[in-house]
Image (spheres, grey):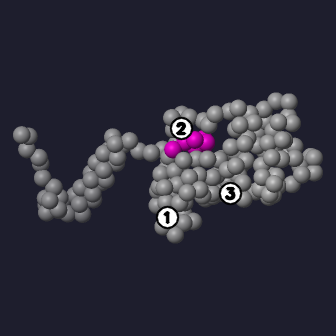
Amino acid sequence: MNAYHEAVAAIYDACEFAAAPISLAAALEEMSARGERVALDPDLLIALFEVHLEAIACPATSSSAWTGDGLPPVGTVCEVFNPELHRSEWEKCTVLFVGKHRIVYDSESCSERFGYVDDLEFRPILTAEQIAQKQLDEALQDIEQLYDSGGPAAVYDAGYRKQEAV
């Protein structure tokens, strides 16, 4: 058994050793109390989370409950903005692990990534109605800026016209 599998087995044992379901943090504290140490890399964090869920028989949290407040729960499909990446932009992701300081997520551009809680931004995926409303708000803001800078003539010159009903 390699060190990776030994670490996963140790976490699993710590979860099983407890009389009641415990959190991953509590399992790590239990291991520490027994003098066991584990180095945590991103792959190991994901494996530990999966073992932890199995050990406490807890399904991943439903993503429909997250409204965008606070951190997304595990299992949430949402959008993430990671300013540390070369091409920083919002991208779709699935949250795999949420810890005290780090989050592990699976993104469309690269499989599993992890980042620090304070460095990442998450938002729910916008619905078609929300996207349409955002586009309308942006267009109205553009028209308002045109009007403020040049009056009705500037709006007309920019190509905005009243639509005739058919």
* Spot occupied by residue 163 in the image (x, y as percentages of width and height): 11, 46
Q: What stretch is highlighted in magenta?
A: 70-77
Q: What residue type is labelled 2?
A: Ser
Helix, strand or loop at mark 1? loop
**Number of residue marks:** 3
CB under 8 Å between discs 2 and 3: no
Q: Looking at the image, which residue is at 81% across and 38% down? A: 15
Identify which residue, 80 or 145, lies in the foreground.
80
Mark 3 → mark 1, Cα distance in angstroms: 21 Å
Tell me the residue at 52%/50% (across/down): 93
When the figure is inspected, residue 103 is found, relative to residue 21, above or below; the finding is below
Q: Which of marks 2 and 1 is nearer the N terminus?
A: 2
- 137 shown above or below 15: below
Q: Which of marks 2 and 3 is nearer the N terminus?
A: 3
Identify residue for label 2.
63
Residue tagged by mark 1? 88
Q: Which of 153 and 41 is in front in this view?
A: 41
**2 or 1: mark nearer the eye:** 2
Q: Few, some or many C-alpha atoms within 10 Å of disc 1 (few <14, some 14-19, many ≥20)? A: few
- Mark pair 2, 1: CA separation: 24 Å
User: In this picture, is 4 found above or below 65?
Assistant: below
From mark 2 to mark 3, how far is it between C-alphas? Answer: 22 Å
Q: Residue 42 occupies which quadrant of the picture?
A: bottom right
Give the label on residue 42, or none: 3
Please name the residue shown 58% across and 41% down the image: 75
Q: State yes or no: residue 5 in magenta.
A: no
Q: Residue at x 16, y 55 (%)?
A: 160
Query: For residue 147, which quarter of the picture?
Result: bottom left
Main SS, magenta region, reads loop
The answer, for residue 48, to whether it is visible in the render is: yes
